[in-house]
Each structure stands twice: as C-alpha cells, then as structure tokens.
Amino acid sequence: MNDVKKQIDDLVDILNRWREEYYTLDDPSVEDHVYDDNYQKLLKLEHDYPQFVRKDSPTQNVGNKILNNFQKVNHDIPMLSMGDVFSFEELKEFDQRVKQNLGTNQIEYNCELKIDGLAISLVYENGKLVQGSTRGNGHIGEDITANLMNVDTVPHQLNDDLSIEVRGECFIYKDDFAKVNAKQEELGKTTFANPRNAAAGSLRQLDPAVTKKRHLSTFIYYMTHFENYGIKKQSEALNFYKNLGFSIDPHYRVCNSIDDVIDYINEYTEKRNKLKYEVDGIVVKVNQLTYQNKLGNTIKIPRWAIAYKFPPDEKETVINKVQWTVGRTGVVTPTAIMDPVQLAGTTVSRASLHNPDYILKKDIRVNDYVSLHKAGDIIPEIGSVNIKKRKNNSKPLVIPTNCPSCNSKLVHLNSEVALRCINPDCPAQLVEKVIHFASRNAMNIEGLGIQVANQLYSNGLIQDIGDLYSLTSNQLLLLEGFGNKSADNLLESINNSKNNSLERLLTGLGIQHLGSKAAYQLAKKFHNINNIINANKDDISKIDGMGSIIAESVIDYFHNESVLVLINKLEKSNVNMEFINTEEYDVDNYFNNKTVVLTGKLDQFTRSEASEWLTNHGAKVTNSVSKNTDLLIAGHDAGSKLVKAQEMNIEILNENQFINKQLNV
C-alpha cells in the first residue's frame, strides 16, 4: 500500500508542477498528451484507492494559481473544466451514462471544435462590457478587462442592451502565432510553446498595447442563466451570441446519435490541419439545456459534456547536428538538423531550438532520438528526447561562447534568454540587415536577396546599407550570376528605392519594435527624418498605436552616433528622408474611413501591398472580422474570415472587384 501511496504522491506532485507551468507560467515543459497520460494514471489509482486522494490533487481542482499582478474576480457560477476521453469506446460509455441518468434515448448532441486557447468570462451591464476575466481556479479568476478591451472580437457594446455573462475561449490564429514567435525570437525573448500559451501570455501581462499587437481572437460558447432568455438548446444559444455581436466558431453541428458524433469527429480529424486556428479535440455537449441542468456537474466537470482529445500528431526522428546562425539583431539561434519525416502534410528536417535555456531544459543532444510535432500546426517543435535510445557516449551539447560569424564574445543582455552578438561589424548581421532593408515591406529592392547580399559582402563591395547606393555595373559584373541586364536591373531598383516615402526607410533601418505600420504613423506625424531624430519620448508615445516601448526604442536608435553617420551617408546618396503624403485623395473615395479585412491569396498584390494601398487611401486595415468591419476583400482559399463575413452580411469584394474600385479612386 505504501508503494501505491508513493505513486499517487509522485503523480500529484509532477502533475501540479506541470499545471503551474501550463496555466500560471504559460511555459509548459511537456506536451499535452504526456500530461493527459499521467493524469489518467492518477485517476485510475485514486479510483482504486480513494483513501489516498489528496486535497491538492489536480483531479480535485480546476486551473491553477492566480497571479498577484491582477485584481481577483469571484465567479458566482464556477467556471468548470472539461472531462476528457481518448477513444470512441469511452465516448460511447459517456453516451450510455447520459441516457441512463436522464432515462431517455432521445438525446441530441451539439459538437463543437475544442479551441486551444484560454477560457475567459465577459460581463455586460445594459449591453456595455464592464468586466473580463480568466477562469483562474474556477472560483476565482484574474481581472483582465483592459487587455480584453484590445481584442478585436470582444464587443465593447452589444447589439442589445442586455445584462449578461458569457464565456468562451481566447485564442490566436496559426499565422499570427508564427509571427508572434518570430518576433519573440528576434527580440531575444522566450518563444511560446503553442498557440494556447501565446494567447494566455498575451492576455496575462500588464501592458494592454502588447495584447493589441498580438491580434488575438475569441469564440463564445456559454452563458450563465440561459433560462432568462428563452433559449432551449446549445445550438440556439450559439446563434443568440452571434446576433448579440460575439464571434462563434461556425463549425458546430447538431448530432442525433453518438454514431453521428463519431462521424463528425472523423471528419474534423482529417480537416484539423487545414483550419486557421489550432484545435486539440471535439467537445460533445447535450444540446437540450434542460437536460444539461438536470445532469448537473461534479465538483470539477459538467456531467452533460465531454471532450474527445485528438491523438498527438508526432513522429520520431534523430538529430544529426545543430547549427548556430546569427540574425539581423545579433541573436544567435540554434537549429536542429534532423532526418526528414512527414508531419502534418509536409516534410520536416529542421526545427528551431530557440536558445540555450531551451536546450538545457530538454537536455537535447546530437544523435538523440526525439519526438517531433508542429506547434500550432505550423512550427516544427521538438517535444521530448527518447532517453532509452541515447548512446552511452552521448555528451551534452556545447553552447558557443563566441559568435559563429565574427568570433566576438556572445552575451546575454538584461534578462534575455537569447545569446547575442553585439559586434556592430558582424558580417552575418550586416548581410541580414541588407536583406531586411531590401525587403518588400521596406525599400523593396528587387533582386537583392540572400545570395546577392552574401556576395556583395564577401567581395568587399558593401560595409553597410549605405554602400548599396554606390554600387556600379562593373562591380556587379564581377559577381557570380550577373550579366549586363541583371546588373542594370538591380541598379535601377536600388536607384528607384531612393524615391520611397520615409516610412519605408524607417522600416528598412530595422529599428527594434518598430514595424511597418508604426513606421507609417511615425513618418506621417513628424514628416521628415530630422524631426524624428529631435523628437522626445512623450511626443512619440502619444501617437496612436505606439506606446512607451516603441518610443524608447526609436529614441535609443537615433541617439547612436553610428546611426547618424549612416543617415548622413544615405542623405548624400539622395535617399528621400521625407514623408510623401499619399493621402491626397478624394475624401469621398470608396475606401475612405472604412474598416477593411484582407483574407486569402491575392494574385495582383501581396497582402502587405494591398494593406498599404488601403491605408494610404483612408481605410483602416484590421486582422479580424467583427461588427465594426465594413468590407472584406477575399482572395483565393479564403477561410473562416470569409464565412464569418457572409454570416454577418458584411460587404465582400473579390480581387477583380477590388481593382475596379481602385481605378475609380
């Protein structure tokens, strides 16, 4: 019996540590299925030996600790978690329990995708949002109203003056998750393990401006006191939420039998990788709300719902070597090179190891066999190491102390987890800066990619981006792959870039935290480079969408003497330093003052080009469809945004219609 008690104690301790990492720290050390497997072991042991159940067991509690940074919110009606099943046999057992407890076989189930996000509560008084909170431990959550106010799909005012509490999931789309992690890595910060942690980390921090930049979304799926609104079914409630102005997941389906539920699960097991957001299972709910009320809840979970969890999509492969590369900002990033495997429809042979802490935490070594999955169905991620297959002569991975490009000493700046090269003359950083400077969103110099940039540097033709404007045809003809025509084309593109508006130059300079949209606002406000150089922090931070972090970064950048030398060099090359006011348009034009969303693939433009054109003609371009959206422009393979716009009767243009409207502006 002592062995059993020790097993239970060990499982409770490790599961509670994993829960804290997942719920409180937003930094899990194991994959969901590892937690689930151990949780199921604990459940069985506690069922067989109830005398050893501990009060702090995860089977007896919801969520985890409440952070001290936020005010506490009491949930009058507890926010419960969901029971899990992992097989159709268990699902059928749930169906039999429901029918037996209700004494009827006439059960409808509403099937909904299980969104991988953070559970939230929204409280409205007379139609106005007054409070938003996390689930917390189910009884007490965190007040994150200010952050939720910056999520586009959370309405500040409902379409009806109701006093109501609704609950749902806050999540991040896969594409936005990839962008957030790329930005985190560029800044030397810890990346998020999965979309759920990205959403949670974005909501549970103290700067609402950060939340806004992360482009979070929400789906609402529950409300308290449904009996007050004459609603009889869960499927009716979802439409009720939509009419109030909330976003709902459109993929729900009413099923008349457990076999129909299984068909639905099989369908979305196949479709899950094609969805725009990550789902980790299917939630099956008794559709009749009176039946839900009759079935009630346990201390932790509702008896009228169950979550079917998808099996993990993982493959085992072996790490052959680890490459360390230097990025534009000096961050040195390790990448595992592995035997290629097929994963979620693509061949994967590389995975970022992010930073030394990540390597040490997982104890990743060359020649290790590792489990590989795709975080957010996009980013290849190593889950765990198969220690049983590790060779006896295996040694821990050596973390470099010197830059792999320039051999300078690497450092950790402030509280960064990343290694960083701070040598301003580092060749790898220069090449990356040139590539960024020439990119489409910046100076848009066609033909200047990584191979050309490397050749320009290795042949001594450039030492900084200012040298691009001194290149000659004779110099380019010395490089591999260049003839008279290609040399002339590149020089013409470089020369044309001199005429770009100031915001493109600001973007190309690669100022930390300053993206293309913020660069546009900065250029529009100050008109020329000298005004920006002489601006103070308060003037910059007051610009819509800026804030103190961007303001400090801009001030610090232009206080660097070497930067001022570069700006002077660019001025002498006649690179434009003025904001070109492209807003001289008819204020009555079709797009002026409209909130526009772009979705799908366009043939004649990139998304960023279309967004820039719309912004320059008075439109506000956002990422999410909401009641404030006036227009959706849909290209090929448009997905959930198009569906939502159709449901909300929002005007929709295809690309040809968009072009025709442009011609009339």
Image (cartoon, grey):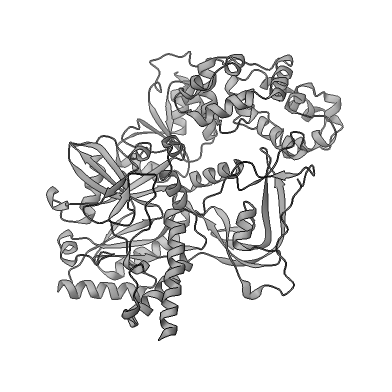
Nearer to us in this view, 218 or 355: 355
Q: Quadrant of residue 631?
A: top left
Seen in the picture, residue 104 relative to 142 is either above or below; the reply is below
Image quadrant for the C terminus? top left
584 displayed left or right of 498: left
Residue 613 percent across, percent down from the top left: 50, 25
Seen in the picture, residue 539 relative to 444 is either above or below; the reply is above
463 displayed left or right of 275: right
| Image point (74%, 26%), residue name | 489
Residue 580 percent across, percent down from the top left: 56, 15
Seen in the picture, residue 96 relative to 160 is either above or below; the reply is below
Is residue 311 something one can see in this rendering?
Answer: no
Nearer to us in this view, 586 or 215: 215
Residue 234 percent across, percent down from the top left: 22, 56
Residue 13 percent across, percent down from the top left: 44, 69
395 displayed left or right of 107: right
In the current view of this chain or complex, which residue is farthest to the bottom? 1
Nearer to us in this view, 446 or 578: 578
Image quadrant for the N terminus? bottom left
Q: Quadrant of residue 467?
A: top right
Q: Quadrant of residue 407?
A: top right
| Image point (24%, 67%), residue name | 298
